[in-house]
Amino acid sequence: MSDWSAGGPPRGRGQRGRGGYDYYREARGGTPAGRRPPQQPPPPPGRGARQRPDTPPPPRKRPRWGRRIGITLLVLVVLLGGLVFYFDSMLQRTNALDYPGRTSADSPGTNWLLVGSDSREGLDDAQRQELSAGDAAGKRTDTMMLLHVPASGGQAALISLPRDSYVSIPGHGKDKLNAAFSYGGPQLLSQTIEGATGVHIDHYAEIGFGGFAGLVDSVGGVNICLDKPMDDEKANAHLPAGCQDLDGPKALAFVRARYSLAGGDLERAENQRKLLGALVHQATSPATLINPFRLFPAASAASQTFLVNDGDHLWHLFSLAMAMSDVSSGQGVTTAVPMQRFGTAPNGASVIIWNKTKAAQLFGAISEDKPIPPDLIGNK
């Protein structure tokens, strides 16, 4: 029998606590004393393997809604600003108010001179026939209005200036008011009106035949109610009584009609104020403002068809539209220059003679930014 079977393992081998070789421990599948078990790599994570409970899941990034909304609003503001400046650059401009020797003093509030001309510029033969524009050369005006917007936020006032008003035209003696436009365009017209009324004009806006019809069409037409039928062959205006929607050509015919009206030029001026109010009401309605398929065509049509003063911009036209919206909704005043009588000019033309006393009261109230006296409202 060997020493191993009789007395255990040989001395010096496998003695515990001395770091020696332990035969029996190794034989039993253990690890030799003093040695660390080899580190096995962790098994690769399989599909559906659970994470160790002591390992926290990666934090989930929360969406930054405030930042996204801010970026979206910034993009919209930049886009809107770009569109405004684009449409503003398309406006046609002229030196309408800076005429030599201008003496009218600036006054409180804001005063617009609104002009509708019979310019055929840009119309081809088919458009001239559709709009019954004829072949007349040059430019005349059938529509002239003053719009006063009070500085204090009171009632806006829209005053018609009849085309046949007999006034003094600088350099041309006395003549019909619309003759000033034929003689010297917007500049002489504004000079004549400032001289006749004493009102300082701050802004000028003019629109021609084609531009007016296109603007009406861009907002989807306008609704007009007539107490009696209209049948004017020269203006090609054939409209039944009652409420009806007018497209561009029909709206233009309506505001041009004159010879079939019992009130002549004065009744036409009333119709022009009525249709202008309907147009502005439609242009500023939610159906237009929240509908990009109407808003952008309307803005484009307005910027391409209006002729404004050198210092006027698209935002000035927007403020004009807001003031006109107040007038059309009944929150403003509409009237005409008080007249004295019909007369005859030396050349035999029929003219309108203003009531000087009442006209002075009317325009004096505007110059002083005061409410128009009630007894002057409603004059035709």
Image (cartoon, helix red, strand yellow):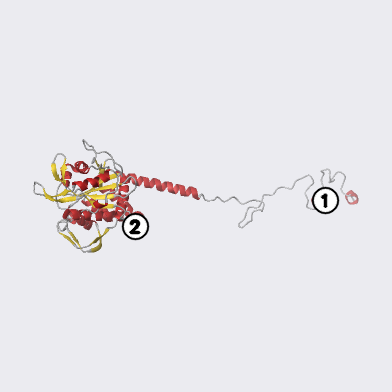
* Residue 92 in sight from this viewpoint: no
* Residue 79 in sight from this viewpoint: yes
Q: Name above or below for residue 368 compared with residue 261.
A: above
- Element class at badge 2: helix
Determine crowd level at label 2: few under 14, some 14-19, many 20+ residues with C-alpha closer than 10 A: some
Q: Which residue matches tag 1?
A: 24
Residue 199 screen position, x and y as percent: 24, 43
Residue type pointed to by label 1: Tyr
Residue type pointed to by label 2: Ala
- Element class at badge 1: helix
Q: Which disc number belongs to residue 287? A: 2
Q: Say which of 135 and 286 sits in front.
A: 286
Residue ID at (26%, 55%)? 216
Query: Extreme top residue here?
Result: 101
**Residues at discs 2 and 1 in contact (Cβ within 8 Å):** no
Query: How many numbered marks does the figure carry?
Result: 2
Gap between marks 2 and 1 measured at Cα: 97 Å
Query: Comparing marks 2 and 1, which lies closer to the viewer?
Result: 2
Q: Say which of 100 and 16 sits in front.
A: 100
Left or right: where 57 falls relative to 140: right
Q: Say which of 150 and 311 sits in front.
A: 150
Left or right: where 24 falls relative to 138: right
Residue ID at (18%, 54%)? 266
Residue 123 screen position, x and y as percent: 20, 51
Q: Earlier in the sequence, mark 2 or mark 1?
A: 1
Residue 202 screen position, x and y as percent: 27, 42
